[in-house]
Amino acid sequence: MSASTTPSSRPAVTEREAREVAEAAREQHWRKPSFAKELFLGRFRLDLIHPHPVPADEAAQRGEQFLAKLRDFVETKVDGALIEREARIPDEVIDGLKELGAFGMKIATKYGGLGLTQVYYNKALALVGSASPAIGVLLSAHQSIGVPQPLKLFGTEEQRERFLPRCARTDISAFLLTEPDVGSDPARLATTAVPDGDDYVLDGVKLWTTNGVVADLLVVMARVPKSEGHKGGITAFVVETNAPGVTVENRNAFMGLRGIENGVTRFHQVRVPAANRVGAEGQGLKIALTTLNTGRLSLPASCVAAGKWCLKIAREWSAAREQWGKPVAHHEAVGSKISFIAATTFALEAVTDLASQMADEDRNDIRIEGALAKLYASEMAWTMADELVQIRGGRGFETAESLRARGERGVPAEQLLRDLRINRIFEGSTEIMHLLIAREAVDAHLSVAGDLIDPEKSLGDKAKAGANAGAFYAKWLPRLVAGPGQLPTSYGEFRHGVDLSGHLRYVERTARKLARSTFYAMSRWQGRMESKQGFLGRIVDIGAELFAMSAACVRAEHLRAQGDHGREAYQLADVFCRQARIRIEELFTRLWTNTDDLDRKVVKGVLSGTYAWLEQGIVDPSTDGPWIADATPGPSRRENVHRPIR
């Protein structure tokens, strides 16, 4: 197959059809309040997050008891350097985690799990991930998006009773959506599940199946053809990995997370009982997206752990390392990096704990909050790790093993940088997260004015939409003119030594400014708004900063009220908010002053070969082969590298 060829079985999908599939999969209604949704609409609903929600005493006690056991296990049984060196988690470590109940942290006790809250599940992932990120991914992929979460949300009681006890103690699960030629565009999904009596026959290839190499159970997304008695559409199935026709064809290797069991899985004429279908036919993408609403919170947890470790190493190293007569921490160029790491770690923990507690309480719709937490944490953690490498200098670039070999402390800073890089891609790349969040952020506008800017709608539909839009904006726009952010006395309860009230007033004013900017852009570009991805990305980034500022201030006040490092928390929140405000003002400037139009022209030139002369003078070390592997359905021609752990 040539490099430009794609498998013939791949559905041909137009851009509009792809958008329609994605739109049908998202939750259409807002049945619960959303702090972040309100923020993008210019309404600062502090009452939705303050006072800071807290876990119930019984849940906290159960969580703390498990964390103590887990800490003892990772300190005595886990050798992160060994996992990095051998690119594999030892079987005995996985068996020990099973015995500890770590594979059932989020599974209810009635099914044999520990029944931990999202807050304590995240704390556990942060703890174990600090010892070995590969273990954090193993546990997260199993519970956050693997079999347990879809069954919890959409499975039947019979399915829960069949599969959840296995997932809690013995079986490892994985989630299979991505294909060699399908990433964030599931409308082109090619794996099929053809009804045949009481079964479905599964054919296709899945790529980047985290846990897939060692998994016992799989959640597989496949396309059911529409036929008599079958609605069809993308559908979710629980598949036994040892079923005939399932082949793990490759264990993939990456620049980081070297211990993860990520593979390529082929299905050839695999019979799956209809009883293993999760939800209805055509509900698969909705199941996937809903699962990710809370599943994404595991990534911020790992980022918080990374920030804490960066801060620890930066503090210890910068105090010990001297240059020009004083510790490097006292040089402003280094000190500013340490301040950034400390303040950002505080904010990331605030965002993660707040979103997680909101998920536990289930009073709010957190689809935007969870997505913002994932987006913001993955970007900021990467920056913190990069700053740590810079603070460490040449030692930051040197491997921990090399440092140990020549007699110094083995600090795996470069490994952290490699391990964190995937978080900007995992479970929705930064670019896709921008678009996903932007879609949710403008949902209120599209609900009242969507038909008005849709070129395919009739004049009658447009007239009706115009009337609805007029009524909505007549009430909404005047509220963006003034608010509590302009009153010096607002949010006075956040004044305790350090004054955080000014930051909350800034959030309120800036939320209204953000909403006005969004409205102006929609008025200006109308139907072309969806193509303005640079603008939408900046809008989302501003919202993420405002959410983080809000969470940081609320957490600081919560800690102060508890008598738990309140003064220091106020200081960190203040510094973080000041840093965030600088970033926000730059983003606002770039909303309208940017090179987006010029960039598009350059891209056309690059793709047409106009600048090919710029590529001369090098050799390309890439090997020959197609850009995308052939995923044509059929029997496997490769050895099965599936490695169940028993």
Image (cartoon, rainbow, N blue to C red):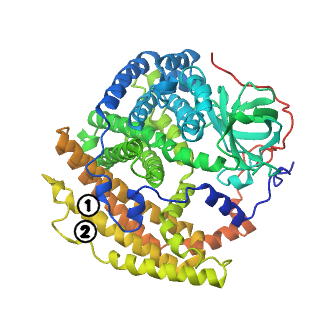
Residue at image position (17%, 44%) is 567
Residue at image position (85%, 31%) is 637
Residue at image position (35%, 46%) is 354
Q: Secondary structure at mark 2?
A: helix
Q: Amino acid at mark 2?
A: Gly
Q: Which residue is mark 1?
A: 504
Tell me, yes or no, whether the two marked residues, 2 and 1, touch with CB atoms within 8 Å: yes
Disc 2 or 1, which lies upstream in sequence?
2
User: Does residue 463 sit above or below 82 in this rendering?
Assistant: below
Q: CA distance from mark 2 to mark 1?
A: 7 Å
- Residue most extreme to the left: 497
Q: Amino acid at mark 1?
A: Leu
Q: Position of residue 555 (x, y in %)?
A: 27, 47
Q: Is residue 548 visible?
A: yes
User: Does residue 127 sit above or below 39 in this rendering?
Assistant: above
Q: Which mark is residue 485?
A: 2
